[in-house]
Amino acid sequence: MSTVLNTLIDQEALNQAQAQDFFEQMIQGEVAPELLACVLTALKIKGETPAEIAGAALAVRNNATAFPALDFAVTDCVGTGGDGANTINISTTAAILAAACGIKMAKHGNRSVSSMSGSADLLEALGVNLTMSPETAAQCLREANLCFLYAPAYHPGFKHAAPVRKAMGVRTLFNILGPLVNPATPSTMLLGVYTPDLLPIMADALALTGVKRGWVVHGSGLDEIALHGSTQVIEITHDGEKSEQVTKTITPEDFGLQEYTLEDIKGGTPQENAEAIQAILAGKGQPAHNAAVIINAAAVLYLHGKAETLAGAASLAEDMLLSGQAAKTLAALVDISNKEPNKDGVPS
């Protein structure tokens, strides 16, 4: 393990296998906290490479609580967090809407990072059982097209890093791992990043971790597709042998939507956000809230070929939202997830 630190001190990158081996040892509690802090610091100073990120992600995913094998592909739409914008829970609500449109959405998330309400906070406020078993989560996917995988329940090995991360008090590799360690191994992803610097890095990391089709986006300061300005996109297509990337810039106009200010989509407490999201899913949300969810869900539909244009995908998403079907999708998730008792002792 000292070889890893020496390599990084020399400002050389780890290969994917080296990174994976180191983080597998960390997950198993075999890395001293002092060494972990040094390695995380050295990675941050050097700048994490896609191979290092992918190696760490695969180590975490390979050691996660097992998720049942599925006979269908799944999708996730998720942000890294850390943009500090404190918006309503856009990606979570977009996942619910995409599920209502027929896409199998395995939402993997945690409590708040950059806002008062993370995906877990919101869904808990809406009545979802965060401690549902992997088998129940798979049942939710089959029957409701939607499940939620609460990260602390699937990644107990993170406990070895928690004290180090808290003591360091700065962003590290762990702040961008979350979207890459979904135990359901989504093959399609809409991934938002908090800084445009991460766009090419995370696009490469997605391909290295097995994602076949995806968008990595940064929306004028947000880890979402923006309504208040333009959004930078790297689209990836990876078939196992070759990976293609296309870089573009999109605007609300491309989706047939109008612009709104960032203030129009500000969020609040989990309960306040839950009330706003319930209104959106019932087809009675504020126009800006609706548009924020539609534009992100539309990207998921577009990635799945549900429409030939972004505007066409947005029209499909809007029709589904106004129909109230998304509210029924959420209700199904709540119902199925609560068919088993809420378990105590799951880390928060």
Image (cartoon, grey):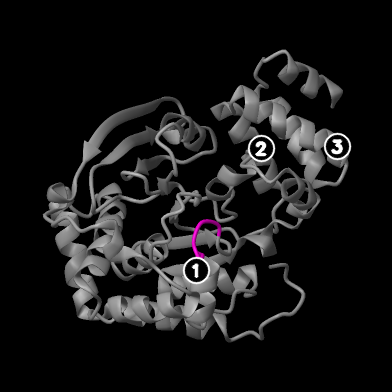
Q: Tell me, yes or no, whether the highlighted magenta stretch contains residue 116.
A: yes
Provide the secondary structure element on which disc 1 rests: strand
Tag 3: residue type?
Glu
How packed mark 3 is, by other alpha carbons closer than 10 Å (few <14, some 14-19, many 20 or more), is few
Q: Tell me, yes or no, whether the highlighted magenta stretch contains residue 150.
A: no
Q: Do the residues under discs 2 and 3 have CB atoms within 8 angstroms?
A: no
What's the CA distance linking mark 2 and mark 3? 18 Å
Bounds of the magenta span? 113-118
The image quarter containing residue 246 is top left
Q: Is residue 30 visible?
A: yes
Nearer-N-terminus badge (2/3): 3
Of residues 17 and 256, the one nearer the viewer is 256
The residue labelled by disc 2 is 56
What's the CA distance linking mark 2 and mark 1? 25 Å
How many labels, in total? 3
The image quarter containing residue 232 is top left
Q: Main SS of the magenta segment?
A: loop
Which numbered tag is attached to residue 243?
none
Residue positioned 48% across, 35% down in the render: 202
Q: Is residue 8 left or right of residue 144?
A: right
Which numbered tag is attached to residue 147?
1
Q: Nearer the viewer, mark 1 or mark 3?
A: 3
Tag 1: residue type?
Cys
Of residues 257 and 134, the one nearer the viewer is 257
Residue positioned 71% across, 34% down in the render: 40
Image location of residue 72, percent across then percent down: 45, 57
Q: Is residue 168 left or right of residue 202?
A: right
How packed mark 2 is, by other alpha carbons closer than 10 Å (few <14, some 14-19, many 20 or more), is many
